[in-house]
Image (cartoon, rainbow, N blue to C red):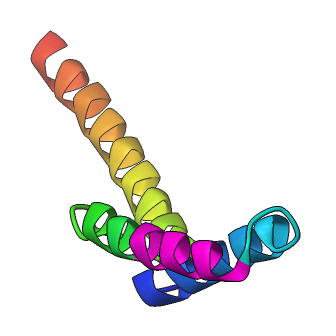
Amino acid sequence: MNQETIVTDLMNRLRDQLRNAIPSQTLDAAMDQARRALHQGLSDFDLVSRQELEAHLKTLAQLQQTVERLERRIGELESR
């Protein structure tokens, strides 16, 4: 999911929640300001998809297992 999709989804949900509570012109102006603030705030983050994150976590777990095996092996070799 990219940044634009995240912002659009959030803004649509927010607009639906506020539609009956705030006059239309005020809501439109507030939504425009909120959208700009969200884009500016999110631009500071490197967003990745859940699938990409899970793939990295799986790789990290495999690397941790490899390091643990190598540490055990080094310990065995040093004790000889």
User: Where's residue 72, x and y in %?
Assistant: 30, 27
Residue at point 21%, 62% (across, down): 44
Q: Is residue 41 left or right of residue 30?
A: left
User: Where's residue 19, x and y in %?
Assistant: 81, 74
Does residue 63 belong to the magenta stretch? no
Does residue 34 belong to the magenta stretch? yes
User: Quick one: 38 or 60, which is closer to the camera?
Assistant: 38
User: Quick one: 28 or 47, which is closer to the camera?
Assistant: 28
Q: Reply above or below: 42 against 62.
A: below
User: Where's residue 49, x and y in %?
Assistant: 50, 77
* Location of residue 32 by image quarter: bottom left
Question: Residue lying furthest right in this view?
Answer: 20
Q: Is residue 44 left or right of residue 10?
A: left
Residue at point 58%, 82% (across, down): 28
Q: Is residue 33 left or right of residue 78?
A: right
Q: Is residue 48 visible?
A: no
Magenta stretch: give its range: 24-35
Residue at point 24%, 29% (across, down): 71
Dominant SS of magenta comes to helix
User: Where's residue 68, x and y in %?
Assistant: 34, 34
Q: Reply above or below: 54 against 69.
A: below
Quarter of the C terminus within the rendering: top left
* Location of residue 5 by image quarter: bottom right
Q: Is residue 54 visible?
A: yes
User: Quick one: 45 or 70, which is closer to the camera?
Assistant: 45
